[in-house]
Image (tube, helix red, strand yellow):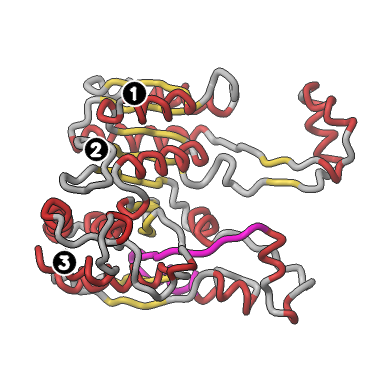
Amino acid sequence: MKKIAVLPGDGVGKDVTEAAMKVLEAVGFKADYTYGDIGWEFWCTEGNPLPERTIKLLKETDCCLFGAITSKPKEEAQEELLPELKDKGFVYSSPIVQLRQLFNLHTNLRPCKAFPGNPLNYRDGIDIVVFRENTEGLYSGVEFHPLPQEVFDALAKHNKKMVRFGQHSLDDIAVSCRVFTREACQNIARQGFEYAKKYGYKSVTVVEKPNVIRETSGLMVREARKIAREYPGIELWETNIDAQCMWLVKNPQDYGVLVSTNMFGDILSDLCAQLVGGLGFSPSGNIGDDYAIFEPTHGSAPKYTGMYKVNPIAMIMTAKMMLQWLGETDKAKRIENAVAAVLKEGKVRTYDMGGSAGTLDMADAVIGKL
């Protein structure tokens, strides 16, 4: 029996996790589920949104089903700590970003599919899968503020363009490093091509900005070209992130597999989610060589906490992705077919679709179609 960690997290993460668990039970998937602690509550009370006990739990399981968490800027996070924890050196860091790096969950897979009958579809026929490199780039956490003098000196020594910032105080300079490795670029490109080959997509589009961000985006594009030679039946398209966003709005049906790095991939996946109804329909998987964490792409929506109001389809489809990864392809397909049937019928709709059904009402409707 598979061992699965369940981390509902904050806000509506708890609501949608409950809905997904009902669907998993109804489809007949048996597993050893263990619930764990993560999120804003534990930051405020312990100074750590990702307690060590939770990391230990994940290391003892086969994969994780993750709800949603609240994140806030550094100053706001400090203010919400318990008084006895303030000024103790605690610094908030996103738990999901930590987990991606800790477990080397290098591939973020985000399918965005338009289901017939969904009133929020931008257009029918959209079937896009975003492959986002998950551990490097601007989200790698290599940042400085204020900028240390030795870092400034090293940058200025190797790049004269940095000298012009010398007119500013180091306290007035913040630097976030966009760090890429050749291995990560090759890996995310290969993941995209392998997926296209397996599921019959005719092209893979690499989305970057090499005409301006020459070294990092340039490395990504060059490595993607090398990988593309191994897949002669699949076209490699290259686009710039700004133009790609425009073309996705103009001609979304032209695209199938999109491959990009961390920040650009994040932007692309939210745009693609809106094309098929919004974040309430957008699942994702953080996938490594030996472990995976599955989560909906939406946030914790604190104002709806405990109201069982939000759309759980993203989380239900996230559970479907987890089953697929575990090899339970029949059960995964049954869940997707049930979701499609509910949307096509149109009788049960949550508030985002103009209806009045609650989170568990939608889960029950999906269960009814199983």
Q: Which residue in the protein does label 2 denote?
A: 127
**Mark 3, secondary structure of its residue:** helix
Percent from the top left, x then y, of residue 113? 25, 43
Q: Residue at x 40, y 47 (%)?
A: 108
Q: Residue at x 82, y 28 (%)?
A: 156
Residue in front for this viewpoint, 353 or 172 = 353
**Circle nearer the viewer, 2 or 1:** 2
Q: Which residue in the protein does label 1 denote?
A: 228
> Is 179 placed left or right of 147 in the picture?
left
Quarter of the image for residue 98 reads bottom right
**Amino acid found under the numbered disc labelled 3:** Ala
Percent from the top left, x then y, of residue 176? 68, 41
> Is 96 placed left or right of 112 in the picture?
right
Quarter of the image for residue 52 reads bottom right
For the record, the magenta segment spans 54-73
**Mark 2, secondary structure of its residue:** strand
* Label 3 CA crowd tier, 10 Å (few <14, some 14–19, many 20+): many
User: Considering only vertical position in the picture, is 161 above or below 42?
Assistant: above
> Is 22 placed left or right of 105 in the picture?
left
Q: Which residue in the protein does label 3 denote?
A: 365
**Circle nearer the viewer, 3 or 2:** 3
